Image (tube, rainbow, N blue to C red):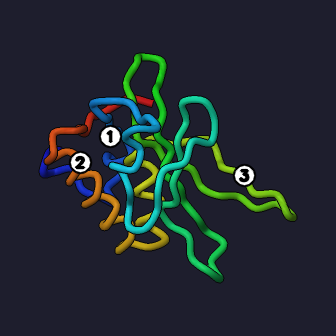
Amino acid sequence: MEDNIKLGNPVFDKMMFVLDKGITEQNHRDYRYENEELIQISEGIWAMPAYMKDNDDFSMFFIITQIDDGNTVVAFSTGEKKDEQFSLSNPMITGKGLNLLTKHNKDRAASILHFLNQISKAAEGNWRIVSE
């Protein structure tokens, strides 16, 4: 990732993290964040909590799926509770989700950015600028 594109800057909203390979039953545990593990919520769509705290209505989830061009991407969704129903928002690209989380909890957003950068350093993914 370019040095001048930083977490919290508006241009970071256009950053997408792309994995080099898809998520499967065989490798999903390789992408654990803290004590959380990816679970398949629908065919080809994996989710994992990124930020959930007791007594905090805001929550965010990693969403990993293959997009139309065949790439497997890391996106984010917020959790939404309506009455007793819990659902996920429409996914947002990686940078936009991290910038949203930065406004709510800067330390957690920085921790997740570090997690993704570790995946990049392991040559299992990389950052790309996209147009929405």
Q: Quadrant of the N terminus?
A: top left
Q: Residue at x 32, y 46 (%)?
A: 11
The secondary structure type at the circle numbered 3 is: strand
The amino acid pointed to by label 3 is: Ser
Q: Earlier in the sequence, mark 3 or mark 2?
A: 3
- Within 10 Å of disc 3 (Cα), the crowding (few <14, some 14-19, many 20+) is few
Q: Nearer the viewer, residue 73 or 24?
A: 24
Q: Earlier in the sequence, mark 2 or mark 1?
A: 1
Whether 112 is drawn above or below 132: the answer is below
Q: Residue at x 35, y 50 (%)?
A: 31
Q: Is residue 101 left or right of residue 95?
A: right
The amino acid pointed to by label 1 is: Phe
Q: Position of residue 82 (x, y in %)?
A: 82, 60
Quadrant position of residue 7: bottom left
Q: Position of residue 41 (x, y in %)?
A: 62, 42
Q: Nearer the viewer, residue 122 or 116?
A: 122
Q: Are marks 3 and 2 in contact (CB under 8 Å)?
A: no
Number of marks in the image? 3
Q: Check disc 1 and report the residue beneath it.
A: 17
Q: Check disc 2 and report the residue beneath it.
A: 119
| Outermost residue, bottom side | 55
